[in-house]
Image (spheres, rainbow, N blue to C red):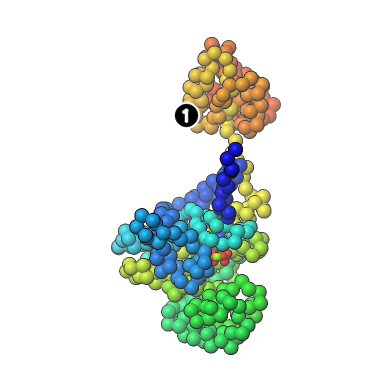
């Protein structure tokens, strides 16, 4: 026998028994995004490598070590599997001039790829839903994005385990002033920094504060805070955002070490964090990136967005027992004898057109084994077509759950009879 081929490490199959969970989460998300008036955008999974280097930034985990990059052997182009969704979305917005006399509220959902060490809540192919709101200076839109997240947790029943952390990164000049003070401070502690920290001390010192290394917590905690370098306008933006969150009753925790280590990020940043998933606790991360369209060759425009990891949300829902069971069909159609196969095809279509979901038995087999399948399918009803039924244009209707009796119905009346029994 030929050797079996396995899925790539860190890239998971979603098997039939699990896919209904994904469909449930996706449908809650779609409903919520429609309620907020966001529009779906679908961009390619592969982009030019330069797009991610330019938009995510060279001194980041993603660009330094996590990207799946390959050469297109046809023309030598360097291409990359998208590690996140903002870059491609903004590339498309600029390329198609979507901000010409317009604002945009966009969402995307799909697989992302990062070459990380696989563990619970961390995979090499994972899925994100993200939104990008473009052309709004805020802070009202900043509050809207947070509210969208809060409403999602509420609809999913996990509002109590998602904590909102917020911070502000100010504007470019304010960050530059803070950066100087931060570098001076970190230099004093250079001997205690880890390798990442020393490497980023000059290239991306803000990102040093973002470390997960427990040994560095104290040093980072005492570092100069960006908030102390804010001017009046930035402070007003931040205070306005917080006031709105308070007005709509969304509790938040200020975390002055919450950063995005890229130059174009500014003002509002936020994360939704849970303590229930260990180290992989961030389920949604977002921020304002007013400089990004310009960096990608477009006109300057305000922008803010977030990305959420769907696997982590599913893990949370699972731990809480909040995932619905797979939906069983309404009807399992059992058929045996002369002419029953064709009668079954016709009746199945008729029932589906009446709004019922129908699994038609295919492949023959004894009446008994077909009834076993009907039971295992979870269907509410078995509809049975034997030779007698086919000859008389009828079907037998057998409720599989509850005590109602099997009885014979004219084929045209099956859907109505089911509707009456369901009521
Ligand atoms: P982390 O600090 O956990 O590595 P990150 O800062 O790299 O996260 P973002 O780039 O902000 O994450 O992505 C947004 C969200 O996508 C994360 O909060 C998380 O829920 C999810 N996510 C990121 N990387 C992975 C992964 N490898 N597997 C599963 N989910 C992920
Ligand atoms: Mg990461």
Q: Is residue 337 above or below residue 138?
A: above
What residue is pinned by disc 1?
353
Is residue 373 left or right of 100 when viewed as pictured? right
Residue 100 visible in image: yes
Residue 104, position in %: x, y? Answer: 38, 60
Which quarter shows the C terminus? top right
Which quarter shows the N terminus? top right
Instruction: Write down the quadrant of residue 194 in the picture.
Output: bottom right
Residue occupying image coordinates x 65% and y 60%: 277
- Residue 214 vs residue 421, the one in the foreground: 214
Residue occupying image coordinates x 47% and y 29%: 353
Residue 373, position in %: x, y? Answer: 63, 28
Is residue 330 left or right of 52 when viewed as pictured? right
Q: Is residue 135 above or below residue 363?
A: below
Splitting the image into four quadrants, where does ligand 1 fall?
bottom right
Instruction: Write down the quadrant of residue 139 in the picture.
Output: bottom left
Residue 394, position in %: x, y? Answer: 55, 16
């Amino acid at each position: 026998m030929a050797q079996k081929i396995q899925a790539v490490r860190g890239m998971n199959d979603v098997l039939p028994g699990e896919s209904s969970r994904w469909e449930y989460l996706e449908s809650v998300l779609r409903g919520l995004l429609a309620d907020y008036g966001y529009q779906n955008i679908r961009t390619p999974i592969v982009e030019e490598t330069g797009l991610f280097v330019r938009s995510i930034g060279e001194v980041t985990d993603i660009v330094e070590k996590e990207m799946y990059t390959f050469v297109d052997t046809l023309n030598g182009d360097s291409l990359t599997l998208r590690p996140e969704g903002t870059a491609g979305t903004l590339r498309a917005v600029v390329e198609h001039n979507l901000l010409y006399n317009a604002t945009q509220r966009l969402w995307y959902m799909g697989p992302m790829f990062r070459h990380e060490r696989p563990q619970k809540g961390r995979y090499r192919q994972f899925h994100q839903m993200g939104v990008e709101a473009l052309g709004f200076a805020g802070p009202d839109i900043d509050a809207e994005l947070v509210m969208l997240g809060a409403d999602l947790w509420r609809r999913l029943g996990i509002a109590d385990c998602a904590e909102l952390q917020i911070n502000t990164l100010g504007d470019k000049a304010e960050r530059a002033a803070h950066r100087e003070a931060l570098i001076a401070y970190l230099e004093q502690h250079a001997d205690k920094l880890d390798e990442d920290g020393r490497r980023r001390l000059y290239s991306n010192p803000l990102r040093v504060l973002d470390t997960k290394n427990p040994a560095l917590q104290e040093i980072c905690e005492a570092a100069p805070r960006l908030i102390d370098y804010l001017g009046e306008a930035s402070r007003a933006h931040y205070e306005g955002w917080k006031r709105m969150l308070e007005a709509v009753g969304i509790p938040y925790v200020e975390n002055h070490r919450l950063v995005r280590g890229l130059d174009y990020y500014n003002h509002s940043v936020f994360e939704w964090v849970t303590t229930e998933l260990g180290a992989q606790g961030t389920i949604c991360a977002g921020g304002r990136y007013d400089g990004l369209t310009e960096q990608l060759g477009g006109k300057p425009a305000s922008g803010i967005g977030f990305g959420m990891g769907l696997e982590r949300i599913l893990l949370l829902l699972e731990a809480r027992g909040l995932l619905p069971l797979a939906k069983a069909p309404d009807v399992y159609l059992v058929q045996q004898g002369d002419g029953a196969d064709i009668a079954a095809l016709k009746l199945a279509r008729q029932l589906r057109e009446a709004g019922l979901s129908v699994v038609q038995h295919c492949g023959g087999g004894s009446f008994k084994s077909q009834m076993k399948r009907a039971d295992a399918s979870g269907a509410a009803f078995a509809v049975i077509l034997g030779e007698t039924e086919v000859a008389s244009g009828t079907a037998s209707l057998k409720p599989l759950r509850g005590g109602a009796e099997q009885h014979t119905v004219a084929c045209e009346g099956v859907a109505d009879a089911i509707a009456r029994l369901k009521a």
